[in-house]
Image (cartoon, helix red, strand yellow):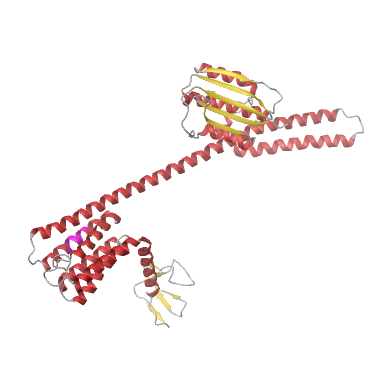
Amino acid sequence: MTNVRKGGGEVVRHGGDFPLPSWWADGDRDSSLRWSGNIRLQADSQTAVTPYAHRVDSRVVRAVLATTRPADWLLVTILLLLAWFEIWVESIFQTGMPGPRVPLTLLAAVAVTPLLARKAFPLAALTVICLAMVAVGVVGDADQSTFVLLLGLLVATYSLAAHATSRNALIGAGVVVLAAVAFESLTFVDKTPVDIVVPVLFLAAAWIVGREVHRQRERAREAAEHTALLARTYQLETDGAVAAERTRIARELHDVVAHAISVMGIQAGAARRTLAPGQTEQSEALLDVERLGREALEEMRRMLGVLRTEEVDQGIGPLPSLAELPTLAADARRAGLEVNLDAEMESDLPVGLQLTAYRIVQEALTNVRKHAQAGSVHIRICRRGPDLEVTVEDDGKGVTGDPEPGNGLFGMRERVVALHQGTLYAGSGDDKGFLVRALLPIKD
């Protein structure tokens, strides 16, 4: 048994097996507290259920208002005015709603107003409407037709089938059947079988149509969820491809930079050994260059170790350059492609730039073999102003519109745009087929 003091002076004693609601203790929101059905309040006359009642009421009102549209208000208003007109003026449909006017007026409001909650609480709304119609049969005269209320019941039946779960839809159908039997037994005066069968058929049709609408909505929701799942999966695969390509680029750049730093260290050591005796300051400076070079290499190896994977490590070997393009073209010819290689083999280009150009051609040829259904491919590498232009064009089936990006295109984009701040085009060729064109800035 535990005492919890609420902000108004009241003390609640509780114990047992049910969790204390989180709103119950204003200051102590201890979820481990338990309460029982025996709740005792002290020092305050306010009841314990008031906060809960207010919270439930506000939730119900918000749920109803969130699902109610202007058309719902218009429907309720029209049906209510028609029902009151039949009660106070004259009948519109058959015998109308004869009987004591004041009770019938209130019951008509009770039978129609729940339609505002037909989407938020379809089973509760239908139940209230059915009870109100039975009450109309009890209070009113025996020759009731209540056609206006029947229209409201049709709308409520459809809404139940369209918005409720399968279990609640079946429960609601049973409630409608019981209410119909009770009402007809109370108002069975001068009625033919047609007068009974026709409303039943309309109610059954409303329920069937509502269930079909419910199924269509469920299928649409599942399709939307499936589409969202595919989009998330595609995004994850894209991110993974980009990350893998960046790791590969990091390894290759490590080899390029490590080679350059090693050469710098070797040259610094050679220069130090050529110094004349007494050049102490120059010797110490060159020693610092050698030491910093070794430290930089060690740090690069340590950083790259975080990025390496088994798949990346399997590709360890000499880095390719533009001089390897004839070998790459020969491999493509052995695979059945007619390859036309037109490349300016410039040895003075930066090693990283040659590596990127080689990877672009390699990936483009891979895509041609896998997807293009091409017979020939033209590779052209040349200078264009301050840029190195890399072009790979095939005579395959090409694409319509924008190509669907895959891992290869993502890798090209990372190398061209992110690494060299160049431009990349991948899409329909000038005549036909598929074209890959990259412009790589040549930086001195």
Task: Please provide the residue range marked out in magenta.
Answer: 173-179
Percent of width and height locating residue 397: 46, 25
Q: Residue at x 36, y 66 (%)?
A: 60
Percent of width and height locating residue 183: 15, 66
Position above or below: 90 against 326: below
Q: Residue furthest right?
A: 278
Q: Residue at x 8, y 63 (%)?
A: 191
Position above or below: 152 against 376: below
Q: Residue at x 53, y 19 (%)?
A: 332
Q: Is residue 71 magenta?
A: no
Picture quarter with the C terminus: top right
Res 349 quadrant in image: top right
Q: Main secondary structure of the magenta part?
A: helix
State left or right for residue 153 relative to residue 365.
left
Percent of width and height locating residue 166: 26, 54
Position above or below: 420 against 338: below
